Image (cartoon, rainbow, N blue to C red):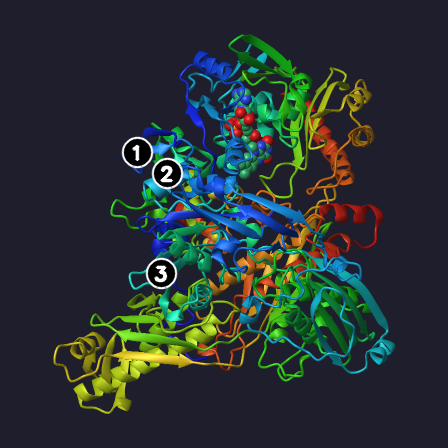
Amino acid sequence: MAKEKTIRVKVNGAERRATVEVRRNLADFLREDLELTGTHLGCEHGVCGACTVLVDGEAVRSCLMLAVQAEGHEITTVEGLTTPDGDPGPLQQAFWDNHGMQCGFCTPGMICAAAALLRENPHPTAAEVRERLSGNLCRCTGYQDIVASVLAAAEGK
Amino acid sequence: MSAFAAIGKSARRVEGREKVTGTATYVADVHPRGAACARLVLSPYAHARIKSVDVSAALKVPGVIGAFSGKDIGGAEILAIDEVFFAGEAVAVVVGEDEAAAEDGADAVQVDYEPLPVVSDPIAAMKPDSPLTRASKGESHDDAGAHGAAVGGAGTGRPKPRNVNQMVEFQRGDLAKGFAEADVVLEDTYRIARVHQGYMETQGSVAERAPSGGFTVWTTTQAAFGARDATAKFLGIEAHEVNVIPTQVGGGFGGKFVLVEPLAAALARRVRRPVRVILDRTQDFLVSHPAPGAIIRMKMGARKDGTLTALEAELVFDSGCAPGAPVGIAALLLGGTYRCPNLDLVGYEVLTHQVDPGAYRAPGAPQGYYALECHMSRLADAVGMDPLEFRLKNAVKEGDIRPDGRPWTRIGLIECLEAARAHPMWRNRKKLGPDEGVGIAVGGWGGGTEPATGGCRVNPDGSLTVQVGSVDITGVNTTFALIAAEVFGLPVEKVQIATNDTDHAPYAGASGGSKTTYTVGAAVLAAAQEARTQVLEMAADRLEAAASDLDIADGRVFVKGAPNRGVTIGELARLANRFGSRYKPLHGQGRAAVHTASPGFAVQLCQAKVDRATGMPHLTGYVAVQDVGRALNPAEVIGQIRGGAVQGIGRALFEAMEHDEGGQLANATLADYAMPTSADIPDIDVVLVEVPSELGPFGAKGVGEPPAVPGAAAVVNAVEAAVGVRVLNVPIKPEAILNGLEEGGTR
Amino acid sequence: MKAAAFDYEAPASLEEALALLQARSDDAKILAGGQSLMPMLNMRLARPALIVDINRLPGLDYIRVADGQLRIGALARHTAVAKHPEVVRGWPVLAEAAAQIGHDAIRNRGTVAGSLAHSDPTAEHPAVLAALDGEVVARSAKGERTLKADELFLGYLTTALRADELLTEVRLPVLPPHTGSTFVEFAPRVGDFAVVGIAAAVTLGGDGAWQDVRLALTGVGGTPFRARQAESALKGTRPKAADIAAAAAQVAEAIEPDSDIKASARYRRQLARTLTERALTTAAERAAGQGGR
Ligand SMILES: Cc1cc2nc3c(=O)[nH]c(=O)nc-3n(C[C@H](O)[C@H](O)[C@H](O)COP(=O)(O)OP(=O)(O)OC[C@H]3O[C@@H](n4cnc5c(N)ncnc54)[C@H](O)[C@@H]3O)c2cc1C
Ligand code: FES
Ligand code: FES
């Protein structure tokens, strides 16, 4: 009784067309159907933030959205924040250079959330970064180097 | 201090590119062609007899490929057969075309249980009329042991209460005399909750039958070889028939040794397809092995001048349904951190109807130090001494005897305390505003050892490839690159690290217990040194000079004093790799079996302000001082320390696995199991103290465990400094502080 | 943690949506922001046979002032409400409530209407609706009705909305001049559901005395608690710390909270008292300050 629907979604700039079960969430669609496994699942109930992607530029939990709801929208995942050649984009580079990750599991969601934050507030303070990224859990870093990474990216470092 | 080329300079992660671009492979990203997905069926009862498991309805669900009970799979260690001993124990498994289909099938499995009496609290379990637990099974998870510190102690004939699997005892001197000599005696009982490692990536494994008939297992483990052996044992095959490919580990902290690897392989055999067993968050909370909660009664005596005279402690560790609680480690550290002539420590490992605990960052130490460090601050108060000076006066140093009769090796506890004393947060602690205060706590870890091998290949492009069999969970690969780079005087970018699968890797033990840099690093150092010797010998032949007259710099070997006479490392490797060459390939092997551990100590200062309206403490500053021996990669060492400190803070403020009387876990989601967020945590100032180890590479000591130890007591002591309310149980309930504020007294 | 199977429809018009809800009133569920429903689907705590996704309904994301009311369409998200200049100016209590819900990514999807329809006992918006005597518009294929807070909220996750009804609009009255309002809550971590929260709006008369006081608490029972006794005790007097404290104590007395894993009943009472005190103080300051509201 697989109830399916064919959808068209723009993902990281490219039109994608796929037939998906309607119950499939956006995260599973990205990971399983499009093989964009940079989007991680840490809880599937909206708390950890590892699955954060950008939908029309806004941070969204991809585990709390159905794939069929993405029809006609533009999705950006961590893979879409690289340079055109697939090398780290500026924000990603800042995370790398500033030790903004350890195990790396929270990193894609963290980077997407940070991208949305910087789009809205290009020069946040450290306190603002802490507050605005508080929906993304990281168990490894103690957050400080993540904050430093975002601030460095904001300064274009 | 000698100058290093690479060591001691912060290097960014060697695997950073893949992690920031989203291309790193974690276990859930592994999808062999034709892979099916498995879903566990878990017991809702903490103790019950399984009357029947009926999978027939599941098999009719569309997309379901197979459904199995414990009897079908054969092996109660992965699926219960006749009886369940904790709520969440797996009783059946369903394999489907995808996760959703497997879950549809799991919903349809019918299990008939006969509920049996439950005891989920260790104190209740020790009562003579308590229901009995699986006291006799006798198998333990070796994880805590794999973390390495000594366990033991001699018995004194104390009776063993009901449901107690193991008792540890340490005695010294004459306790009664010690208390008689004391000017102040303080006694109280502290509780610290059962907590989860909280890694962001849930556990999982993917298994596939190999063409040879063996199995390939991709898994998120800290111990590839351990996972291999366990899987082979379960399947009844030889270890070499299993190849474990360790994936990136999305956080382990001691929690990821072996869990579903054997099941994944068994299922792959049964359904003849690759099988993915990826736990969801709730299942992970229920079936994985968390850190045990503990109840610790402390009684200490001190003289007015601050000398400790007696220490009595009774430690009760909730070991869940199987032995393995690190009560021995806890007792050893609790009784071994301060000099005290008269000791009596007894630890009980109590069995209950809960999942059995595993390792979590310094297993046993956070519990033991929580009680010790709360008590030390209060005792300092009682004798009218500054809490830091009181600790300094009694702190152990090299040569002091631990409760197990062995001497401490070179440790930096005193140096850490002195560094804390010099820190502005400590110096200015009396100048804070109302309701704000600074607490101090010490934590330590004995360190671990395990033999390891490493390889170092010299490449024709002048680079090095370091081969290891250890899994990188803390940035150790970057450290290995620094070690090899240091030996060759090369930039760190010239070193690649290959973490190989168990078919190809040089042997290494589990990554855990703060021993990976210490032991595998030693092997890598030896391998790089051997490769360097080979390079020098070959260059000596080429340059017609004695090897001892040669030096290496900038990727080139040259004659000392005649820098023009030289040859690049790349040229040598090319020559050695050439068809018909008379030179042997340049490849160093290193082996290490360091078997004396280098203990590490940490001191943390917490500055907290209590909101009088809600009772909630807010951290306004934090300092983490740690003796790291030598910081090979300072940025990553600092990152380890911050991450560990936040886990300690989590124990203080939020974290507890809450069970009801029936043994049900009440908070098996990340919404209900609260971990610190970026907004809860202040900047953490890390102060590195370097008291080099005599044994670790370049003086390094393990750094992963100690920072996770002092946090709980540091926060609780800060609360008392802020508003005078003493909290006894963590996580702190703001309610308890509020009540304390209203009524005065301790909580 | 994957949802059980369901049918899915994303109607393009309200009529179509209402028709679907009428036809499938026994087993359909509305999907708005999904920030409460999706976790429940993933955990299989909800197993509807049909999901009616209302996100494609046109023109329902409005936030506007009309006929003396603030009107919020069913698809207005928490983020939009929290940042809307008119809301920030005229209904700080609502803007602050919306801003304290979850985190950015939650607020970007979750809706005010969905929060009211969900009726979580610790959610912010139900208390705002109750405090301001707002109402919601419920539409079905058969017609339309409006419900006040005490009519809408029946208990833990239960409302008077019928299965064929769609909550199309939330209406809050324009607050009179010299009104100050605020939303104050306690949650151990930023973004967590509140343990206890309070919506307060107070209006000061020309004489500086309390003319109108509105207090509603969340987290102290299955539905928002309107503290009417404390409200009337204050009215007519001039703001004084002692009276505020007495009113707060009265609130703590009047509520009947339960104990659960997050907090004991006793602690909830303590929080209700201190938060009421804070909320009243802030609201009164705002009312007395420039611009009133
Ligand atoms: C991590 C996390 C933290 C959160 N923190 C908070 C918090 O602090 N405070 C808080 O209040 N909430 C919190 N939420 C929930 C969030 O506010 C939701 O947005 C809100 O509760 C529901 O709104 P929704 O639009 O997402 O509704 P949905 O999830 O789509 O629906 C919720 C329920 O309401 C029904 N429904 C929705 N819209 C309508 C409608 N127009 N007419 C009739 N029925 C409707 C649905 O059928 C469903 O039963 C949190 C959620 C998450 C995941
Ligand atoms: S997986 Fe979506 S928030 Fe955790
Ligand atoms: S780096 Fe491991 S969870 Fe953030």
Q: Position of residue B507 (x, y in %)?
A: 39, 74
Q: Quadrant of residue B463?
A: bottom left
Amino acid type indicated by mark 3: Thr
Amino acid type indicated by mark 1: Ala
Q: Position of residue C264 (x, y in %)?
A: 75, 41
Q: Are marks 1 and 2 on the same chain?
A: yes
Q: Which residue is mark 2?
A: A29
Camera-nearest residue between C88 and B342: B342
- Residue at the location (34% across, 55% down)? B17
Tell whether B248 sits left or right of C95: left
Find residue B35 and name its label.
Answer: none
Q: Which residue is mark 3?
A: B216
Tell whether B83 sits left or right of B19: right
Dot 2, how many residues are within 10 Å of its Cα: few (below 14), some (14-19), or many (20+)? many
Residue B489 visible in the displayed image = no
At mark 1, the secondary structure is: strand
Amino acid type indicated by mark 2: Phe
Q: Which is closer to the viewer, label 2 or label 3?
A: 3
Dot 1, how many residues are within 10 Å of its Cα: few (below 14), some (14-19), or many (20+)? some
User: Disc 1 to disc 3, how far (Cα)?
Assistant: 31 Å
Circles 1 and 3, Cβ within 8 Å, touching? The answer is: no
Camera-nearest residue between B500 and C287: B500
Q: Quadrant of residue C162?
A: top right
At mark 2, the secondary structure is: helix
The residue furthest left is B580
Q: Which residue is mark 1?
A: A18
Tell whether C12 sits left or right of B395: left
User: Disc 1 to disc 2, how far (Cα)?
Assistant: 9 Å
Q: Position of residue C263 (x, y in %)?
A: 71, 41
Mark 1 or mark 2, which has the lower sequence index?
Answer: 1
Q: Chain of mark 3?
A: B
